[in-house]
């Protein structure tokens, strides 16, 4: 699957598809590292809706400034708590404790602050929101509607021409 390859390992067609999606060598390799390095994998709580969180997870999320509405919100219109704009060392001890209860550690928390990890706009879109060009590019990378829209640990990696 192309998402498990470094930029230099992508075929010309896969690079063209990635480029059309807004990826460039540094951002692709950074996301590859986040997928492949255990320290950059988000904890299971990241994929849960508020109502699926255990009592202690809800308390931890509240410590980080989340409410049910802000936790469950998706998209650019969401107002995230200030904790989401801080690196680990900028979090208060209480915020670090809350993040820890949700499964975060400093390395995974700080992964998103890497300036080379800027994601293309298509990354946050559902399949039905993609432009035709983005769909064509996603298909070239081995994605389909099901794999693109899938969230959580149960998702299967997209396959691309059995590479």
Image: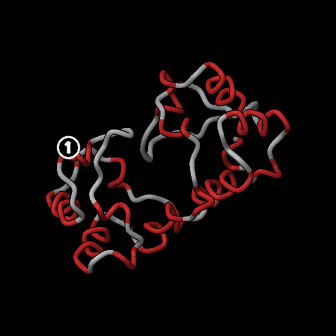
Q: Tell whether 31 sits left or right of 108.
A: right
Q: Between 126 and 121, which is closer to the camera in this rendering?
A: 121
Q: Tell whether 72 sits left or right of 157.
A: left
Q: Quadrant of residue 16?
A: top right
Q: Quadrant of residue 131?
A: top right
Q: Quadrant of the C terminus?
A: top right
Q: Classify 10 Å Cα crowding around label 1: few (below 14), some (14-19), many (20 and above).
A: few
Q: Residue at x 48, y 72 (%)?
A: 107
Residue 133 location (% of width, % of height) = 66, 23
Asked if 79 appears above or below 36 in the picture, the reply is above
Asked if 70 appears above or below 161 in the picture, the reply is below
Residue 80 location (% of width, % of height) = 30, 52
Q: Residue at x 31, y 65 (%)?
A: 83
Q: Tell whether 135 sits left or right of 154.
A: right
Residue 53 location (% of width, % of height) = 22, 52
Q: Between 40 and 82, which is closer to the camera in this rendering?
A: 82
Q: Quadrant of residue 154?
A: top left
Which residue lies under the disc numbered 1?
69
Residue 64 location (% of width, % of height) = 24, 64
Colour mapping: secondary structure
Asked if 77 appears above or below 40 in the picture, the reply is above
Q: Secondary structure at mark 1?
A: helix
Residue at the extreme right: 12
Q: Between 115 and 152, which is closer to the camera in this rendering?
A: 115
Q: Residue at x 26, y 72 (%)?
A: 95
Q: Residue at x 20, y 43 (%)?
A: 69
Q: Quadrant of the N terminus?
A: top right
**Number of callouts:** 1
């Amino acid at each position: 699957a192309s998402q498990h390859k470094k930029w230099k390992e992508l075929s010309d067609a896969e690079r063209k598809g990635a480029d059309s999606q807004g990826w460039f060598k540094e951002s692709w390799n950074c996301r590859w590292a986040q997928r492949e390095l255990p320290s950059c994998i988000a904890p299971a709580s990241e994929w849960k809706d508020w109502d699926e969180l255990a009592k202690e997870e809800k308390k931890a999320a509240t410590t980080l400034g989340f409410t049910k509405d802000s936790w469950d919100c998706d998209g650019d219109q969401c107002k995230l708590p200030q904790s989401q704009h801080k690196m680990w060392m900028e979090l208060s001890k209480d915020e670090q404790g809350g993040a820890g209860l949700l499964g975060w550690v400093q390395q995974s928390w700080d992964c998103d602050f890497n300036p080379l990890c800027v994601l293309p706009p298509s990354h946050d879109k559902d399949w039905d929101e993609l432009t035709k060009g983005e769909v064509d590019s996603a298909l070239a990378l081995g994605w389909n509607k099901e794999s693109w829209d899938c969230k959580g640990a149960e998702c299967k990696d997209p396959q691309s021409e059995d590479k």
